[in-house]
Image (cartoon, helix red, strand yellow):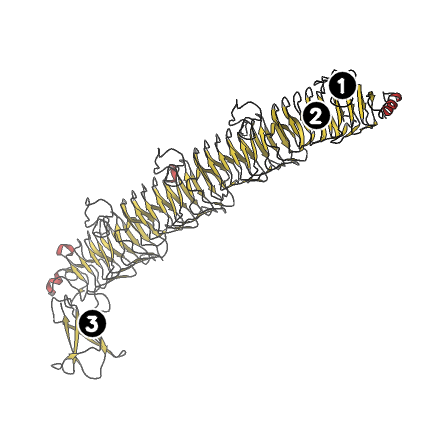
C-alpha cells in the first residue's frame, strides 16, 4: 500500500508556479515526485522520493542544499541534463551555479550537505538515471558521499561529475550500477567507494586529486571496467576486489591509471573474467584472483596484460604515490588460483600477459593451476615470484613461448600434471627452470634457459599414453629426478638432439616403449647432471663437480609378465650410470624388443649394458670406460652384436650368455679382456662372424650347444678359452674357416693369436692345458656333431678333460685342414665315435694325436674316399702318435708320420701288436720322395671310368699322369683325368692302358 506523503499541496503548487519565475530560488523539502522544471531549488530539509514515485529533473535544475539536508530516494530519479545545461546538486554556499541564495556565505566546503541517497533495499527501488549532472560539496552525514546507492535496482551515472565530497565522490553498496564517462575530483577519500556485491560497470571515467584512491571497490561484482584515467590521487588507480556474477570484462585504462587488485577477486564456476589487451593490474599484499570458472587474459604483443606489485613503479608509474620508498619484491601479492577440482572448471587462457612479484601465500606461485579442466599459456611472463612462477596440480596445461625469470623457487612446479612446455625460456630461477613431478607429459622442445639453480626441466613420476619430448636449446636439458616410469602400453619418444640428465637417485623405468631416433649430427644423450659437456653447465657450478661413473642409476627396460619394456635407439649416448642396484647404464629385463644402432654406452659404475632374457639387436655401437663389462648378459638371450667397438672397459668388453644371438665385425682395445666372453647354453641356431683380428671370442666358462641347435663359426674368427673353460656340444658345431682366413682357437694367454686379450702385456705365457677342450656328446639321443675346416687349436687338453677334442658317442665328426697342437693330453679322443680326419696336422701334443678308446675313426681310407693326408708328429713325447683300444681295424692310410719307413711308423702306433686291440693300418703312407708308388687301380664299369691311387710324396706340389698302350715304353702326358690328392680319375678307353705317375716337387 502506498505510504502517505509528508509534503503539502501548497508546496507542490508553489514549486510548479515558481518554476516559471526567473531570478528567484524555490524552497523545497519533504516528499518529491513529478517533473521539476529548470531553475534553482533551495533544499531546506530532506527530500524524499517514495517507492513507486519518480522525480524527473529537467536540464538546468540546480539544487542547493542547506546543511543537514539531502535527498533520499526509495523510488526513481531521472536527472537528464545536457552538456550545455547540466543538472547541479551542490551546497547552499556555492554561488558558481544557479541563483545566489540570500543565506549563502559564498564559501562552499566539503560536507556542506548530506548527499543523495538511493535505497533499493527491502522493497525499495532506489533507481536513478543521471547524465550531465554535477554533484558537489556533499558527504556531510554517515552516508559519506555526494551520491550513495544502496541495493539499487538500477542506476546510471553517465557523463557526470562528483567532486569535493567530504569523503567519497560516490559510494555504492550492492545493486546494479553503470558509471560511464564521468569525473570524480577532489573528494576527501575515494572518487568512488564500492562494497557489498555491487554489480558495477565503470568505463571511461576520470579520477583526479582524490585524497586516497581514484576508486576503491570492496566486495563488488564488477561487470565491465576500462578506459578510465586519472592523476593526482593518493593512489592513481581503480582498486577492486569481490565476487563476479556472470561475465566481467576489463579493458585497458589510460596510461598511469592501472587497476589495483586490493584483495581476493572470486570468479565462480559459471563466471568469466575477461581481461583485454593493455590492462595493467597492480596488486596489494593480499591480492588474489580465485577462479573456479573461466579466466580469459587476451593480451597482444603490442599491448601486454600485466599483473604486478603495487610497489612496481616501472610499470604505469608511482601508483601508490610513495615515491619509490618501497621497492617491489617477490611475494608482494598472493597470485592467481585457477581451480578445476571436482565440479569446478578452473579454465585459464592467457596470452601476452606478465605476472610479476606474486607467490605471497600458500599457493607458492604467481599462477596456480589446480585440476584445471583447460589451461593454455602463450607468450606470458612469470617473474620474481616468492616461490614458483607457475604451479600446476593435475590437469594438462599447455605452456608455449613463455618466460620465467627470477622466481625464488622453480620457474614452474608441477605435481601429477600433464603440462606441456614448448619454446619457453627460464632464467635466474633459484631452483629448477621447471620441475614436474608425478605425471610426465609431452613437451614440444625449443625451451631454453640460463642462470637457474638447475638449467632444465626436471621430471619424475609415471607417464601415461604416448608422449614426446622435443629437443631444447643446447644449454637446457631434461632432468630426471628420482624414478620416472613409462607405463605398459605407453610410449615415450625423444626428438633428435634431446639431452636428458639425471641426478644420483634417478632411474628411467620403461614398462612400455622408449623411442630415441637420434641422428649422427644430433644424437640423443642420457648423462649425469654433473656432465657439462652436454646440455651445458646445468647446475651452474662452473665445473666444480666432474661427472663420474655411478652419478645416476640408469634406464631399465622391463618386459616381465605383461609388460613390454621395448626400446628403439639410433645415435644415442648413455654415460655415467650404473649407480645403486641397477649396476648399468641400460638394463634389459625380459624386454620384448630392443634395437640399438650407432649408440654409445660409456662410463658406467658397473656394466655399460646389462641384459637378461631380452631380445636386443646392437649394431655399430660403442662401449667405453665402463668399470665392469662393456656389455653383460648373465642369463637368457644375449644381444646380437655387429660392428660394435669396446674400449677401456674394466672387465670383459662383453660377457654374454650363449642362449641365442649372432655376432660379428666387432672390435676393441684396452679392456680387461679384449673380446666377447661367452658362457651358458646355446638355445638356437646361431652364427658367429669374425671380429677385428685383435678382438676375439672368449669362452669364459662352461659353454654348451643344445640338442637340435647349431653354432656356425665363420672364417677368420678367433676364439680363446679361459682356464678350465669347456665347450660341450650336444647339437652341432661347425667351424668353417678357409685357407686364407682360418679359425683360431687357443688360450686366453696366447698373445700371438688375437692380440693381448687379457691385457696383461707379457705377464703370462700360454701353455699346454690352459683350457680344457671341446666335448662332442652324442649319448642318450644327443648328436654331438663337430665339423672343423681350416681350424687351428692349441694349448687345450687340461685335466680331467683328457683331450682338446673329445668325441663321446658323437654322431659325426669331420676334420679338414685342421691343426691341433700343444694339448696337455691328447689332441683328439674318441669314445664310441667315428670322426673322419683329412689334411690335418696333429702335432706336439702331450698325449696321442688320436686316442681311440672305442669307435672307428677314419684317419685315411685306402680308396681315398675319406680322410687321410694328415700329419702326426711330436705327440706323446715322440711316443704313440695314434693309440687304439678298439677291436675294429682302423684305416690310417696316406698320412705323414714324420718318419718314412714302415717299421718306425709302426713303433709309434699302439694297436694289435701291443694289445688285444684291432690293427691300425697305415701303409701306404706319405713317402719322403718319389716316385709315387701305386696302391691300386680301379675300374668302374658302371661309370665307365678308371681310378688310380698312389702313395703320396712329402712336399709334392702336384702330380702328372702318363699313359701308354705298352707297359714298357711310349708314355705320353695324359690330361683326360681329374686329380684329387693322391688319386686320379679319367674316362676308360677301350684299349688296354698302362699308367705312370710322377710327383711334382719344388
**Residue holding disc 1:** 92
Q: Which mark is residue 24?
A: none
Q: Residues within 10 Å of mark 2 (few under 14, many from 20)?
A: many
Percent x, y for residue 344? 62, 36
Please tell me whether mark 2 or mark 3 is closer to you in this view: 2
Q: Earlier in the sequence, mark 1 or mark 2?
A: 1
**Residue holding disc 2:** 162
Q: Are marks 3 and 1 in contact (CB under 8 Å)?
A: no
Percent x, y for residue 167? 68, 20
Q: Which mark is residue 983?
A: 3
Q: Are marks 1 and 2 in contact (CB under 8 Å)?
A: no
Percent x, y for residue 140? 72, 18
* 657 or 520, nearer to the observer: 520
* 159 or 102, nearer to the observer: 102
Q: Residues within 10 Å of mark 1 (few under 14, many from 20)?
A: many
Judge whether 721 appears above or below 739 on screen.
Answer: above
Instruction: Compute the Cα span from label 3 to label 1.
Output: 147 Å
Mark 2 secondary-structure assignment: strand
Judge whether 22 appears above or below 911 on screen.
Answer: above
Residue 147 visible, this orientation:
no
Quadrant of residue 98 in the image? top right
Amino acid at each position: 500500500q502506498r505510504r502517505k506523503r509528508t509534503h503539502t499541496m501548497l508546496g507542490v503548487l508553489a514549486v510548479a508556479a515558481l518554476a516559471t519565475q526567473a531570478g528567484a530560488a524555490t524552497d523545497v523539502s519533504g516528499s518529491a515526485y513529478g517533473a521539476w522544471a529548470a531553475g534553482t531549488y533551495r533544499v531546506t530539509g530532506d527530500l524524499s522520493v517514495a517507492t513507486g514515485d519518480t522525480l524527473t529533473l529537467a536540464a538546468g535544475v540546480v539544487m542547493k542544499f542547506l546543511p543537514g539536508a539531502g535527498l533520499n530516494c526509495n523510488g526513481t530519479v531521472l536527472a537528464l541534463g545536457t552538456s550545455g545545461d547540466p543538472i547541479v546538486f551542490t551546497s547552499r554556499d556555492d554561488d558558481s551555479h544557479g541563483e545566489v541564495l540570500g543565506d549563502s556565505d559564498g564559501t562552499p566546503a566539503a560536507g556542506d550537505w548530506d548527499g543523495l541517497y538511493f535505497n533499493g533495499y527491502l522493497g525499495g527501488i532506489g533507481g536513478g538515471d543521471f547524465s550531465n549532472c554535477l554533484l558537489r560539496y556533499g558527504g556531510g552525514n554517515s552516508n559519506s558521499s555526494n551520491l550513495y546507492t544502496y541495493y539499487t535496482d538500477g542506476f546510471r551515472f553517465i557523463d557526470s561529475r562528483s567532486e569535493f565530497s567530504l569523503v567519497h565522490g560516490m559510494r555504492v553498496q550492492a545493486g546494479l550500477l553503470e558509471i560511464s564517462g564521468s569525473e570524480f575530483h577532489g573528494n576527501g577519500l575515494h572518487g568512488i567507494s564500492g562494497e557489498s556485491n555491487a554489480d558495477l560497470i565503470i568505463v571511461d571515467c576520470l579520477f583526479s586529486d582524490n585524497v586516497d584512491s581514484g576508486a576503491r571497490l570492496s566486495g563488488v561484482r564488477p561487470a565491465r571496467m576500462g578506459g578510465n584515467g586519472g592523476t593526482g590521487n593518493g593512489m592513481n588507480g581503480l582498486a577492486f576486489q569481490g565476487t563476479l556474477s556472470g561475465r566481467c570484462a576489463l579493458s585497458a585504462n589510460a596510461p598511469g591509471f592501472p587497476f589495483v587488485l586490493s584483495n581476493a577477486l572470486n570468479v565462480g564456476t559459471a563466471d568469466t573474467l575477461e581481461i583485454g589487451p593493455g590492462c595493467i593490474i597492480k596488486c596489494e599484499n593480499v591480492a588474489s584472483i580465485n577462479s573456479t570458472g573461466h579466466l580469459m587474459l587476451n593480451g597482444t604483443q603490442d599491448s601486454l596484460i600485466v599483473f604486478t606489485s603495487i610497489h612496481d613503479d616501472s610499470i604505469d608509474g608511482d601508483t601508490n604515490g610513495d615515491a619509490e620508498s618501497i621497492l617491489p619484491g617477490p611475494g608482494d601479492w598472493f597470485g592467481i588460483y585457477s581451480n578445476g577440482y571436482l565440479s569446478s572448471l578452473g579454465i585459464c587462457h592467457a596470452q601476452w600477459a606478465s605476472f610479476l612479484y606474486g607467490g605471497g601465500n600458500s599457493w607458492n606461485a604467481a599462477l596456480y593451476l589446480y585440476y584445471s579442466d583447460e589451461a593454455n599459456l602463450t607468450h606470458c611472463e612469470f617473474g620474481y615470484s616468492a616461490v614458483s612462477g607457475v604451479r600446476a596440480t593435475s590437469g594438462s596445461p599447455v605452456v608455449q613461448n613463455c618466460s620465467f625469470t627470477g622466481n625464488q623457487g622453480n620457474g614452474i612446479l608441477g605435481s601429477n600434471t600433464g603440462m606441456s612446455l614448448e619454446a619457453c625460456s627460464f632464467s635466474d630461477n633459484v631452483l629448477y627452470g621447471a620441475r614436474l613431478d608425478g605425471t610426465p607429459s609431452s613437451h614440444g622442445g625449443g625451451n631454453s634457459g640460463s642462470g637457474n639453480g638447475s638449467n632444465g626441466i626436471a621430471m619424475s613420476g609415471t607417464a601415461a599414453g604416448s608422449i614426446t619430448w622435443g629437443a631444447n636449446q643446447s644449454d637446457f636439458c631434461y632432468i630426471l629426478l628420482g624414478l620416472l616410469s613409462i607405463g605398459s602400453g605407453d610410449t615415450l619418444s625423444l626428438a633428435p638432439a634431446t639431452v636428458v640428465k639425471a641426478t644420483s637417485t634417478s632411474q628411467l623405468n620403461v614398462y612400455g616403449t622408449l623411442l630415441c631416433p637420434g641422428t649422427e649430427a644430433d644424437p640423443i644423450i642420457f648423462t649425469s647432471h654433473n656432465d657439462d659437456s652436454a646440455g651445458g653447465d646445468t647446475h651452474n657450478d662452473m665445473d666444480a663437480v666432474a661427472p663420474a661413473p655411478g652419478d645416476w642409476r640408469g634406464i631399465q627396460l622391463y618386459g616381465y609378465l605383461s609388460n613390454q619394456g621395448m626400446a628403439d635407439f639410433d645415435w644415442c649416448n648413455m654415460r655415467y650410470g650404473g649407480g645403486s642396484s641397477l649396476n648399468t647404464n641400460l638394463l634389459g629385463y625380459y624386454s620384448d624388443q630392443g634395437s640399438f644402432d650407432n649408440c654409445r654406452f660409456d662410463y658406467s659404475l658397473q656394466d655399460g649394458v646389462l641384459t637378461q632374457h631380452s631380445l636386443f639387436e646392437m649394431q655399430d655401437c660403442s662401449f667405453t670406460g665402463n668399470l665392469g663389462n662393456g656389455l653383460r648378459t648373465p642369463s637368457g638371450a644375449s644381444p646380437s652384436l655387429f660392428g660394435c667397438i669396446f674400449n677401456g672397459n674394466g672387465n670383459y668388453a662383453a660377457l654374454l650368455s650363449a642362449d641365442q644371438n649372432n655376432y660379428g665385425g666387432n672390435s676393441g682395445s684396452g679392456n680387461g679382456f679384449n673380446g666377447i666372453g661367452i658362457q651358458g647354453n646355446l638355445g638356437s641356431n646361431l652364427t658367429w662372424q669374425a671380429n677385428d683380428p685383435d678382438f676375439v671370442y672368449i669362452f669364459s666358462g662352461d659353454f654348451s650347444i643344445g640338442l637340435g641347435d647349431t653354432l656356425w663359426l665363420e672364417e677368420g674368427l678367433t676364439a680363446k678359452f679361459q682356464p678350465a673353460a669347456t665347450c660341450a656340444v650336444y647339437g652341432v658345431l661347425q667351424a668353417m674357416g678357409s685357407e686364407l682366413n682360418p679359425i683360431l682357437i687357443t688360450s686366453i694367454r696366447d698373445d700371438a693369436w688375437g692380440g693381448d686379450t687379457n691385457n696383461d702385456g707379457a705377464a703370462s705365457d700360454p701353455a699346454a692345458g690352459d683350457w680344457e677342450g671341446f666335448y662332442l656328446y652324442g649319448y642318450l639321443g644327443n648328436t654331438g656333431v663337430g665339423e672343423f675346416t681350416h681350424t687351428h687349436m692349441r694349448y687345450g687338453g687340461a685335466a680331467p678333460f683328457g683331450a682338446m677334442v673329445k668325441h663321446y658317442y658323437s654322431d659325426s665328426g669331420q676334420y679338414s685342414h685342421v691343426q691341433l697342437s700343444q694339448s696337455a693330453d691328447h689332441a683328439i679322443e674318441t669314445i664310441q665315435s667315428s670322426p673322419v680326419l683329412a689334411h690335418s696336422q696333429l702335432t706336439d701334443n702331450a698325449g696321442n694325436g688320436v686316442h681311440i678308446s672305442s669307435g672307428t675313426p677314419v684317419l685315411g681310407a685306402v680308396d681315398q674316399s675319406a680322410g687321410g693326408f694328415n700329419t702326426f708328429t711330436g705327440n706323446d713325447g715322440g711316443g704313440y702318435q695314434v693309440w687304439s683300444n678298439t677291436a675294429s681295424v682302423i684305416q690310417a692310410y696316406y698320412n705323414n708320420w714324420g718318419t718314412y719307413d714302415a717299421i718306425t711308423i709302426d713303433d709309434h702306433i699302439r694297436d694289435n701288436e701291443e694289445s688285444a686291440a684291432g690293427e691300425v693300418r697305415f701303409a701306404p703312407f706319405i713317402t719322403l720322395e718319389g716316385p709315387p708308388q701305386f696302391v691300386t687301380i680301379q675300374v668302374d664299369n658302371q661309370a665307365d671310368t678308371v681310378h688310380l691311387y698312389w702313395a703320396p710324396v712329402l712336399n709334392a706340389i702336384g702330380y702328372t699322369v702318363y699313359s701308354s698302350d705298352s707297359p714298357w715304353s711310349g708314355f705320353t702326358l695324359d690330361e683326360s683325368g681329374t686329380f684329387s690328392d693322391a688319386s686320379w680319375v679319367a674316362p676308360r678307353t677301350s684299349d688296354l692302358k698302362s699308367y705312370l705317375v710322377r710327383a711334382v716337387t719344388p
